[in-house]
Amino acid sequence: MKLSQNNAPIMEAMKNHLLNRVVPFDVPGHKGGRGNQELTEFLGIQCLKADVNSMKPLDNLCHPVSVIKGAEMLAAEAFKAKHAFFVVNGTTGSVQAMIMSACKAGDKIIMPRNVHRSAINALVVCGSIPIYVNPGVNKELGIPLGMSVSDVEDAIRENPDAKAVLVNNPTYYGICSDLKAIVELAHKNNMLVLVDEAHGTHFYFLDDAPISAMSAGADMAAVSMHKTGGSLTQSSLLLCGEGINFDYVRQVINLTQTTSGSYLLLSSLDIARKNLALNGRKMFAKTVEFAEYARIEINKIGGYYAFGEELIDGDAFYSFDKTKLSIHTRNIGLAGVEVYDILRDEYGIQTEFGDIGNILAIISAGDRALEIERLISALSEIKRLYSKIETGMFDHEYINPNVALPPQVAFYSKSKSIPIKESEGEVCSEFVMCYPPGIPILAPGEMITKDIIEYISYAKEKGSFLTGTQDMQVNNINIVIQ
């Protein structure tokens, strides 16, 4: 049967399987929910019946030859890629497979330092060497931007043996680099371009959006379908362009991806792709309408700054994702994480994250106009009730790293735990980060400076959720024994 974007091969096979009333003498042991009544009542009988194991009619994620293969072909077509892989280890799995397919132990990879922890985790596992490009910084907002093309060019010239360039596009804040120029520059120097496109699913289905990775000619892109594409949490796509050995990439994916791929996640990817292909442009046009309206109204409140395309500079802030509602809060005397907490605890509003100076609200077509108004009203009231004079506030989110050792070497070195406040001048052997967004403050192999110690202390004081250290209280840090 010839497939079209109207098909959802995995969902269709699942429906046929459920109609056949097959007797399950295989895993999972809940047997369609009959073996765990409380779980069935909580999640629903249809969900439990659809939680099945790989079998011939349903294909196998590790070696797809039928319905999963068909679903991946349709995804590649919808995203204008040469091949697409369904990934159920989250976009963390997609990012790591992308890096590990391009780089081996000792290979250099050029990347911005404000990458997600998954990218540096991949370096710890595979032993590749990062060549960090410090992103631009907007001093007013205190946030990292994208990569300047001239900085990438300098990194390539100084490291002509690098295997790949990794680009965040967009960043968590919706900021995009000049991706097409970076692709052309890297390819001219025989380097692959890998794009962490976790927050850019909609670029493929939104008119007047920043350029997508595949349209820019990138070699691979990790796309977090669950973030803005409508699939279930933890489901992701890894897209591949021309010249990539898809069979090798599949082998790399299978090094770390589960052999028990969830059909709940797989079918959600399949159904979400169908929905995007048929309705994506209408959905994301509505998303932009919501976000633009909220931006205008929040800026009318005063004190807050919901930034957007007016900051485009043609360089490190090359373009902007208009679906993102990033709001700077420091001018009302509150850290972003403080506004984040007040919104959740006092107003029942959950935003994506709050950092030192900003909050991010994820907007989608699934939102309602009344909820957008509720957010705007809550921010207005927070300003009236909680604003204070801006004194003693940390004014930057990004600190340039001083890399002393490769991440893998530092992570596996002999180490000892000491109080963070006494760690200045030492080399870190683990991560410290606020989550979300999961961008490391410190990564293995980096020097610990006074600025970093003050940042960590301030983030804890303001209520940021710090992770990454063996010490669950994040009072101590592991350092390399020199």
Image: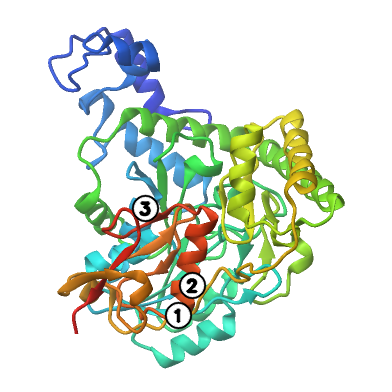
Q: Amino acid at mark 1?
A: Lys
Q: CA distance from mark 3 to mark 2?
A: 29 Å
Which callout, 3 or 1, points to the residue nearer the camera? Answer: 1
Disc marking residue 454: 2
Tell me which label, 3 or 2, sits earlier in the chain.
3
Left or right of residue 47, residue 330 in this image: right
Element assignment for label 3 = helix
Using the rendered image of the protein, determine whether residue 1 is visible from the camera's viewpoint.
no
> Residue at (28%, 78%) from the top-left corner?
406
Element assignment for label 2 = helix
Q: Amino acid at mark 2?
A: Glu
10 Å crowding of disc 2: few (<14), some (14-19), many (20+): some
> Residue at (38%, 61%) from the top-left corner?
117
Q: Quadrant of residue 209?
A: bottom right
- Front-lying residue, 19 or 410: 410
> Residue at (58%, 61%) from the top-left corner?
356
How far from the left and from the top, in percent, is residue 255? Answer: 20, 53
Tell me which label, 3 or 1, sits earlier in the chain.
3
Disc marking residue 450: 1
Q: Amino acid at mark 3?
A: Thr
Left or right of residue 455, residue 254 in this image: left
Left or right of residue 312, residue 14 in this image: left
Is 444 placed above or below 60 here? below
Q: In this figure, which residue is indicated by the disc labeled 3?
A: 92
- Front-lying residue, 461 or 197: 461
